[in-house]
Image: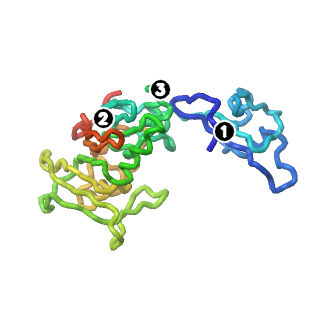
Amino acid sequence: MPPRSPLPARHGLSAAWVRTPDRHSLPLPPWDTMAAWLRDKLPAHVDVAAFLTSDRFVYGDGRPVLAEDPYLPNTFVWFHRDLRFEEPVPGSLDIVHRDERIIVVDKPPFLSTIPRGQHVTQSVVVRLRDSLGLPELSTLHRLDRITSGLLLLAVSREWRGPYQVMFEHGTVSKTYRALAPWRADLSFPMTVRNHIQKTRGEWQAFVVPGAPVNAETLIEVESRVGDGLAVYRLTPRTGRTHQLRLHLNGLGIPIEGDPLYPVVRETDIDDFSRPLQLLASELAFTDPIDETSRSFVSARELPLLTEGP
């Protein structure tokens, strides 16, 4: 666990840190200076020389790391990474509820839940940490980047544990709605149970026939839309990766706008023109702190359209 950062958050993101080793197997460390160690330690895309020149590396007491500083073992160095420009995700990130412990937001499609990969500033956590001045704000569960709807966050570390336990124990009631093809030969309500697995680095999850059930979804028809579509009410009793998308696809009714099921469809990272028609529409639970009943409903409706800025 690193000590407290000497650098303030930037764009809602804490500073990154690296630490020199405690000891070396050789009699002398292989670096004469901190600069030499930083060049060895950090990836090639970090311009160590430029960072040193502009005092972007600092020690724990806030002093800048200088190019000529001798190497020191067991020493923390802090810095802010360069971020790529991210096209602003259209649509509003609406606060449905806020108190001293939790925040519930209604997120648009294409906005990542957490900073990850190429989506950093365009994420719920970073946007809200920055706009609300809450550096410890964190999500208690996640939605896929292309899924819209309700997301629960803890205001600070103090409250994360009690609310996280709700999701671990499955005591949070979550309801989704999806727009997908209508099939007259299917009978609803229907419960789909199977074993879902996802391999790291692969886009699609898959069903493992005969394996113990780890994914369960109740599927109901809520309304017909036009000639060939329907709005389905989905109540997941588990929370596997891509569970709802995979369960509907397995019935031959893939969710409208899905870029992964039934086949992977290549899309530009900044293409916001075709939202996935999946909405996390309701969230309910008994508050673990004061035992009050909490219930929230998304203001969004299907079909989801590309929203303005």
Q: Position of residue 222 (x, y in %)?
A: 15, 48
| Mark 3, secondary structure of its residue | loop
Q: Residue at x 84, y 42 (%)?
A: 32
Picture coordinates of residue 307 (x, y %)? Answer: 30, 32
Circle 3 or circle 2, nearest the eye: 3
Q: From what the image shows, is residue 150 above or below residue 172? A: above
Q: What residue is at 21 percent from the left and 61 percent from the top? A: 191
**Would residue 230 appear left or right of 26 to someone viewing this image?**
left
Q: Which residue is mark 2?
A: 306
Q: Decide if residue 266 is on the left or right side of residue 303.
A: right
- From the top left corner, tell me how far across and down residue 211 is, in percent: 36, 71
- Give the amino acid at mark 2: Thr
Where does label 1 land, which residue?
Answer: 46
Write the residue at 59% across / 28% down.
Answer: 8
Residue furthest toward the front? 290
Q: Height in image: 68 above or below 37?
A: above
**Closer to the eye: label 1 or 2:** 1
Amino acid of disc 1: Val
Classify residue 151 as left or right of residue 225.
right
For residue 133, which numbered disc appears in the image?
3
What is the spatial separation of the Cα atoms under label 1 and label 2, in whole angstroms?
36 Å
Q: Nearer the viewer, residue 68 or 3?
A: 3
Between discs 3 and 2, the one toward the N terminus: 3
Helix, strand or loop under label 2: loop
Judge the density around disc 1: few (<14), some (14-19), many (≥20) Cα neighbours within 10 Å. few
Of the numbered discs 1 and 2, the one sitting upstream in the chain is 1
Circle nearer the N terminus (1, 3): 1
